[in-house]
Each structure stands twice: as structure tokens, then as C-alpha cells.
Image (spheres, rainbow, N blue to C red):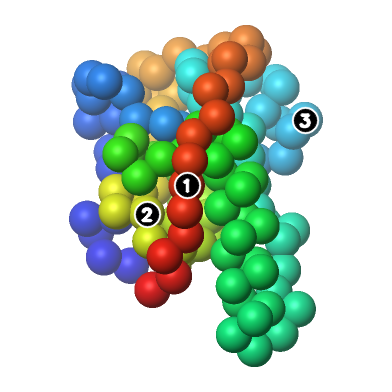
């Protein structure tokens, strides 16, 4: 993976305005504590039925609608994470990249790195403001 796709915990904590943060863990883990402001979202269980163009377009549209409902837009950077640097967050990053998001990154070391760097956790869910994310598959 290109290292520019990774963001360190200290850099994430210093970003203002904050990017949209997507916690790709299972809902139970998210409920037990997450990065403040993070939205629990994972398309890990969304699958493409086939690689025919029509099915890829349908997949992209369905996933883009999930992202838009969570507040994803092209204008706002997105950071994805899970407990460590694992496959759920990596897949989320890949899908965002595939669908044409211009500024998506993954938290290097995930939630463990966030906590190790002194980052706090919360159980509070953020108020979601729907976005408008139109896919442009790459």
C-alpha cells in the first residue's frame, strides 16, 4: 500500500477541520468506545454479484448511498480505522478509492495506535449529516 494512504494518530488528532472518521469495526465494538466523532460504517459485507459492468455499477451506487447517508462527500477527507491496521479498514479504503473519493486514508495502527498516542474514546454517537457522494469508479 502506498504510505501516503496512511495517517498517523498524532496527525489525525491535529487536523482542523476534522475529517469524517469511519469506524469499520462491528457495532458492538464501536458501542464500547470509538474515536470521538467517528461514524460506525462498514461495507465489508457488501458484495458484487458479478464483474459484469451493470453489476459493478449497481454495487457502486449501493455503496455510494451508504456513504452518503453517513456524511461522505468528495470535499471532506475521510479516515477509516479498525482495531489495528487490518482488512476491514483496508477494504473500506480500497472501495472509497475505487469509487473515486479524492482524499481517503487509513489510520496507521488503528484504534490501538490512537489510544497509545493518548487519544480519547467515547461511546457517544455523532449526529449524522447526509452527504452527496456520486461514485466515479476508477
- 52 lies above or below 24: below
Q: Earlier in the sequence, mark 1 or mark 2?
A: 2
Q: Quadrant of residue 113?
A: top left
The residue singled out by tag 2 in the image is 101
Q: Earlier in the sequence, mark 3 or mark 1?
A: 3
The residue singled out by tag 3 in the image is 28
Residue in front for this viewpoint, 123 or 40: 40
Q: Nearer the viewer, mark 3 or mark 1?
A: 1
Q: Residue at x 32, y 23 (%)?
A: 18
Judged left or right of residue 4, residue 38 is right
Q: CA distance from mark 2 to mark 3?
A: 28 Å
Q: Quadrant of residue 87?
A: bottom right
The residue singled out by tag 1 in the image is 133
Residue in front for this viewpoint, 18 or 62: 62
Judged left or right of residue 28, residue 85 is left
Q: CA distance from mark 1 to mark 2?
A: 8 Å
- 110 lies above or below 137: above
Are the residues flagged by discs 1 and 2 in contact, CB closer than 8 Å? yes
Mark 2 residue element: loop
Q: Residue 118: x percent and y percent? A: 36, 17
Q: Residue at x 62, y 10 (%)?
A: 124
Q: Earlier in the sequence, mark 2 or mark 3?
A: 3
How many numbered discs, if any?
Answer: 3
Amino acid at each position: 500500500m502506498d504510505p501516503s494512504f496512511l495517517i498517523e494518530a498524532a496527525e489525525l488528532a491535529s487536523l482542523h477541520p476534522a475529517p469524517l472518521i469511519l469506524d469499520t469495526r462491528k457495532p458492538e465494538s464501536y458501542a464500547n468506545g470509538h474515536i470521538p466523532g467517528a461514524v460506525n460504517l462498514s461495507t465489508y459485507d457488501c458484495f458484487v454479484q458479478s464483474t459484469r459492468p451493470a453489476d459493478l455499477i449497481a454495487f457502486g451506487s449501493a455503496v455510494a448511498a451508504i456513504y452518503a447517508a453517513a456524511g461522505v462527500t468528495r470535499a471532506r477527507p475521510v479516515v477509516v480505522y479498525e482495531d489495528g491496521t487490518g482488512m476491514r479498514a483496508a477494504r473500506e479504503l480500497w472501495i472509497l478509492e475505487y469509487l473515486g473519493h479524492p482524499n481517503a486514508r487509513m489510520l496507521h495502527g488503528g484504534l490501538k495506535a490512537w489510544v497509545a498516542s493518548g487519544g480519547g474514546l467515547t461511546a457517544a454517537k455523532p449526529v449524522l449529516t447526509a452527504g452527496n457522494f456520486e461514485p466515479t469508479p476508477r
